[in-house]
Each structure stands twice: as C-alpha cells, then as structure tokens.
Amino acid sequence: MRLGLAIGLGLVDIQGSTGAIGTAPVVNTYSPEDDATGVTQSSNLVLTFDQNIVFDVAGGDPVLRHSGTTVVETFSIASTTSATGDGGGTMTIVGNQLTINPGANMGDSLGHSFQI
C-alpha cells in the first residue's frame, strides 16, 4: 500500500492548544512517512506537530479520501480532542499528536489523502 498525506487547512482548523492567534502548528513527523510503501493496511496515521494542538469544534469535518477524489470516511468533531468517523473510525489528539484510525483498512496500491 502506498500512503500519502495531504494536510491542508480549510475544512477543519487545528490550532495550538491555547487557541490563541499566533504561529500555526506544523507537522514535524508523519507515521507512516508521506509516500511510504509497504505500509500495513490496518496502520493508523500518526502526525506529530511542533506544539500541542486541538480541533476547532466550530470548523468543518475532516475527510479521508483515496486517489484524491473518492471519499472513504468523513469524521465529525466531537470535542477539541476527538472525532468519530461515519465508517467507525476515530481521530484523537493527545498533546501534540494526532492519531487517525480509519474505520476500514486502506486498499493496496492506492494513494490516500487526509484533508483537515
């Protein structure tokens, strides 16, 4: 499986945990790495930011897609640290780490993107 993460601000704001206007959080590490190959289909996506983060509960819904167009799962923000997907997946924030656990395994030989 090939995995690529597209992180874009627009549907959901991820803010520094203070909620104050300032420097936007930046992703320091992706696990699995962006464009990784040989990733287990059941792998979670873990993004580590340069500061603690929270979801903006007034923002839109994060969307997981494959091949950039087909929606795999849409998540509803439940709190500043959790979201639930319409396919049974979850998103959780602990400190500076966002973990995305899709409700279904990712397909082989497909590119996937996640827009937040």
Image (cartoon, rainbow, N blue to C red):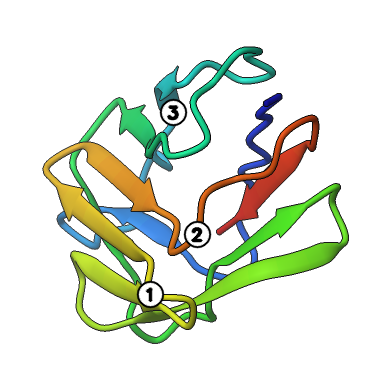
Residue 104 bears which disc, if any? 2
Q: Residues within 10 Å of mark 1 (few under 14, many from 20)?
A: few
Of labels 2 and 1, earlier in sequence is 1
Asked if disc 1 and disc 3 are in contact, CB closer than 8 Å, the reply is no
The one nearer the camera, 111 or 60, is 111
Please report the residue visible at 68 percent of the width from the left and 40 percent of the height from the top. 6
Of labels 1 and 3, earlier in sequence is 3
Residue that label 3 marks: 27
Residue 51, position as x, y percentages in the image? 23, 33
Q: Measured along the vertical axis of the image, is residue 97 above or below residue 29?
A: below
Residue 96 bears which disc, if any? none
Q: Measured along the vertical axis of the image, is residue 75 above or below residue 97?
A: below
Q: Nearer the viewer, mark 2 or mark 3?
A: 2
Q: Is residue 112 left or right of residue 46?
A: right
**Amino acid under disc 1:** Gly
Residue 88 bears which disc, if any? 1
Report the Cα–Cα distance between label 1 and label 3.
25 Å
